[in-house]
Amino acid sequence: MKYRKLGSSDMLVSSCCLGTMTWGNQNTDEEAAAQLDKAWDLGVNFLDTAEIYPVPVEKEKQGATDRAIGKWLKTNGRARDEVIIASKVAGYNERFTWMRDGPTRVTREQIIASVDASLARLGVDHLDLLQIHWPDRYVPMFGSVAYDCSKERDDAVPFDEQARAMGELVSSGKVRAWGLSNETPLGVAEFVAAASREGAPPPVSVQNSYSLLQRSDEVGLVEAVRHHDVAYLPYSPLSAGVLSGKYDGLSQAPEGTRLKLFDSYFDRYANTCAPECVECYKKLAFNHGISPAALAIAFCDSRPFVTSTIIGATSVEQLEINLQGFGVEWTDDLEEEIKRIHAYFPDPWRMIVRGGG
């Protein structure tokens, strides 16, 4: 396992970050503990949670992921400083009214309340990294393909207020460092500037969706994170399991899979060129003697702008397969073959197949 500096912070994180969003829904506390034990035995020191987890978000289950992690922390025998915990405060959402007194927003009061609740569920006195899960302002995300000017809002929480709250949390010792998620180049630059104005430490990370099928961050965001010493943490490196090849030839998602939980995602996959593109990557992986999942994860890990790749699993066996991706020797031949496939399928999620709608 490799270890890399987390942006401008003083933390060294493993190149693999363990994702947790299925724990409490698709996984029991015992299964979560087994995954944590396996990951830490193999050198992982970094885990990612969020106040809204598990997903899909439900009032009755919200916070179960944190509680599963807290249970493991109490019983696994590892020192607190051996576990780097990243969590996320929810962005603007009018539906999650049970989490606060009204919609979730990224105001100073809500950020601080979110952290206090997360610390209580986890049973710890500080978070190593707190990220804004998605912006308070409108941005295209979660499958949106273009900026829609009609969705802009005038009431977005100012960048300065958010940065000031993060600075207060760092000063209080409740948070060691802070970062962003589902962000844009503009957002990164604005938050860095806001932190400077407020005398707060700058954001040290941005966590965005990135994979062989979703490489839009290479245009714009990579320049921003490199320039501002912000760690890039890709999530969904398997595109919700699509790049593992397990959905090939299926007319509907199997029970118990991520795409079954999000039917619209499967429809989007089935009606684009993504399946054809995945088949090309599968053949490339098999030609090099590795699994499709290992290829997809190794691709992310090999990018010079990536600090740590977030992987999730619903079983220890699946986790072990995914962890193999961090041991793949990346060669010039692999790089050239991926460039060739990417040139043919530059944006497979948005390349609609004939008759697909």
Image (tube, rainbow, N blue to C red):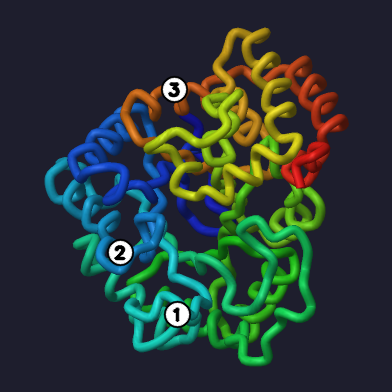
> Which numbered disc covers residue 62?
2
Q: Residues within 10 Å of mark 1 (few under 14, many from 20)?
A: many
Mark 3: secondary structure = helix
Please, what is the three-letter code of the amino acid marked with disc 3?
A: Ile
Q: In the rendered image of this protein, does residue 52 appear above or below residue 351?
A: below
The residue where tag 1 is placed is: 104
Residues tagged 2 and 3 counted as in contact (Cβ below 8 A): no
Please, what is the three-letter code of the amino acid marked with disc 2?
A: Gln
Earlier-in-chain disc, 2 versus 1: 2
The residue where tag 3 is placed is: 321
Mark 2: secondary structure = loop
- Tell me the residue at 35%/82% (across/down): 100
Mark 1: secondary structure = loop
Instruction: Report if residue 167 is visible in the image.
Output: no
- Residue 54 figure quarter: bottom left
Q: Residues within 10 Å of mark 2 (few under 14, many from 20)?
A: many
- Tell me the residue at 57%/78% (across/down): 136
Horizontally, residue 272 falls left or right of residue 4, namely: right
